[in-house]
Amino acid sequence: MSADQIAGLERLRTFTDPAVITRPMDVSGLAQLFGIDPELLSALFATNSQSQGETPPSQGQNPPSMEMSPLNFAALVVSSASDPSSPVAQMMEREQIEQLTTLARVMQLSTSGTPIPVKQFAQIVGIEARQVALILAIADSETVGADWAFTPQQVVAALEENTDLLDADQAEDLARLFTIINDSIAGRAYTPG
């Protein structure tokens, strides 16, 4: 995984914690969590308050509903931005809306507790499914994998089928090892020379 992907996963971890994403936060907390300008968030809150029939605040006053959970905030932005003429869609950049749409899906799945296929999670967060599966297998190897048993030939064959996960030198060494193992099993003898 690239350094950017690792940093993104570390940031994403926060958005998978139900205790964090369901706790109401004020504008500065949400701005820090989502990396959005607090003034933009205040404007979004004011727009939301007005759309719900609340009286607009006087100059310098905060809108009455200045707290919202990250889960509800993301859902509000996503639903509001689905209409390109909405004030929310007008205030936010398309990239911000796309990121919040992804985070909203992750948060919704995190609060539901419903397991999803690795492929679906990988699509949501933009990581190759094979990388996610490999990481999960490695993470699970001490518990589930402790009882796994493979012949050296099976291990090498599996690695050879996935050489894109190795660098060129490792792939070359592995191909030689696979040949030696297969030849040994077949009873072929090697002679010096």
Image (cartoon, rainbow, N blue to C red):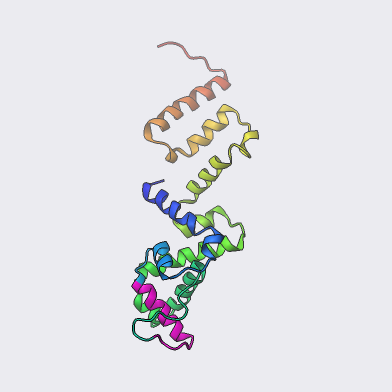
- Residue 87 is one of the magenta-drawn residues: no
Q: Is residue 98 above or below residue 189?
A: below
Q: Is residue 40 above or below residue 4?
A: below
Q: Nearer the viewer, residue 186 or 144?
A: 144
Q: Quadrant of the C terminus?
A: top left
In this rendering, the count of numbered labels is 0
Q: Which residues are magenta?
A: 39-57
Residue 76 lies, in percent from the top left, at 48, 75
Residue displayed at 41% across by 64% down: 34
Residue 31 lies, in percent from the top left, at 39, 66
* Direction top: furthest residue: 192
Residue 29 lies, in percent from the top left, at 43, 65
Residue displayed at 38% across by 30% down: 169
- Residue 52 is one of the magenta-drawn residues: yes
Tell me the chief SS of the magenta region: helix
Q: Nearer the viewer, residue 85 or 193?
A: 85
- Would you say 103 lies left or right of 147 here? left
Q: Is residue 147 above or below residue 73?
A: above
**Res 84 seen here:** no
Q: Nearer the viewer, residue 129 or 162?
A: 129
Residue displayed at 44% across by 25% down: 176
Q: Is residue 59 above or below residue 143?
A: below
Question: Residue 114's image quarter?
Answer: bottom right
* Direction right: furthest residue: 147
- Would you say 147 lies left or right of 183 here? right
Q: Nearer the viewer, residue 144 or 10?
A: 10
Residue displayed at 44% across by 37% down: 163
**Res 180 seen here:** yes
Residue 85 lies, in percent from the top left, at 38, 83
